[in-house]
């Protein structure tokens, strides 16, 4: 069975602080894919990043960075120098090699206070 | 930039009525999906569709639900007899290849908020 756990339900930080969103996954597949999506207050789901199970290189995109650690089955997301516009619900998600579906975690609601 | 479009943005329907939610996936994508999100909860997979047939479906996708690609551009979700618990945001998504087999990211539409009264 596949499962994604985002233990942090809500996080609130002051603007310019760094914040890390945790994601832990479970899968029996040897090949799998991990995703992060952002859901701003307007409601749409915005793709942020994809990572396959063979690529443990960390990735940085501007203020965003992702840390994939297979040993701990984690795929954490860090926002540095947070901004009010980063306020959203962030979903971590997983897709196995044999499936044409994405399993989402329950999401972390991030609030950035000015 | 190509995007997935969904209509209507908000639909109110009476319990027991049939409802059809419409989606236009990104034009060169081959896989199509429906997900739903009950207010404040997680995004749940309903069904995936490839090569004019259902590829996978969840236990939520029972006989009350059906999907169709009636022409080369639209992808629809029909709920035959709506229940109160069908009230949710329904997202259509598409991907160029399978999200599992190829790890291709899915792009989501802006959603249709369905309210069953």
Image: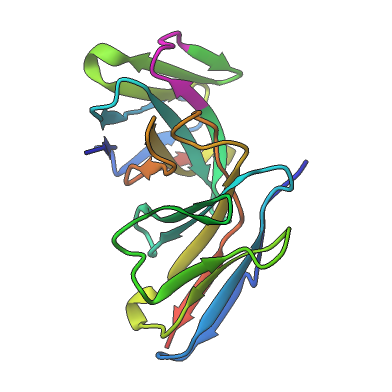
- Indicate yes or no whether the magenta region holds residue A51: yes
- Describe residue B59's horizontal placement relative to residue A84 as left or right: left
Relative horizontal placement of residue B111, taking residue A67 as reference (left or right) = right
Query: Residue extending furthest right?
Result: B1
* Residue drawn at 44 percent across, 40 percent down: A90
Q: Is residue A114 at all visible to an observer of this figure?
A: no
The front one of B58 and B87 is B58
Q: Quarter holding the C terminus of chain B? A: bottom left
Q: How is the image coloured?
A: rainbow
Q: Position of residue A27 (x, y in %)?
A: 25, 30
Rendered location of residue B17, percent (x, y)? 47, 90
> Is the magenta region chiefly helix, strand or loop?
loop
> Which image quarter: residue B35?
bottom left
Residue B49 visible here = yes
Q: Residue at x 45, y 82 (%)?
A: B80
First to last magenta residue range: A50-58
Residue A77 percent location from the top left of the image: 42, 25
- Which quarter of the rendering shows the N terminus of chain B? top right
Residue at 71% across, 64% down: B71
Q: Quadrant of residue A47?
A: top right
Q: Position of residue B29 (x, y in %)?
A: 66, 43
């Amino acid at each position: 069975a596949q499962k994604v756990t985002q233990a942090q339900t809500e996080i609130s930080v002051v603007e310019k602080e760094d914040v890390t969103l945790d994601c832990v996954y479970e899968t029996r597949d040897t090949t799998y894919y991990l995703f992060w999506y952002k859901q701003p207050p307007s409601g749409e789901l915005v793709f942020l990043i994809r990572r396959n199970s063979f690529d443990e290189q960390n990735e940085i995109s501007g203020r965003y960075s992702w840390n994939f650690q297979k040993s701990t089955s984690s795929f954490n997301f860090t926002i540095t120098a947070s901004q009010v516009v980063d306020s959203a619900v962030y979903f971590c998600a997983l897709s196995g090699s044999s499936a044409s579906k994405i399993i989402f975690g329950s999401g972390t609601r991030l609030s950035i206070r000015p | 930039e190509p995007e997935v479009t969904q209509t209507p943005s908000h639909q109110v329907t009476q319990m027991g009525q049939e409802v059809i939610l419409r989606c236009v996936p990104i034009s060169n994508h081959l896989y199509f999906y429906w997900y739903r999100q009950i207010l404040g909860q997680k995004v749940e997979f309903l069904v995936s569709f490839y090569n004019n047939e259902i590829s996978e479906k969840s236990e939520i996708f029972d006989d009350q639900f059906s999907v169709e690609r009636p022409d080369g551009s639209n992808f629809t979700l029909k709920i035959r007899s709506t229940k109160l618990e069908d009230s949710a945001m329904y997202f259509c998504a598409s991907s160029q290849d399978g999200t599992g087999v190829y790890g291709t990211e899915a792009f989501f539409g802006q959603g249709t908020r369905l309210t069953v009264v």
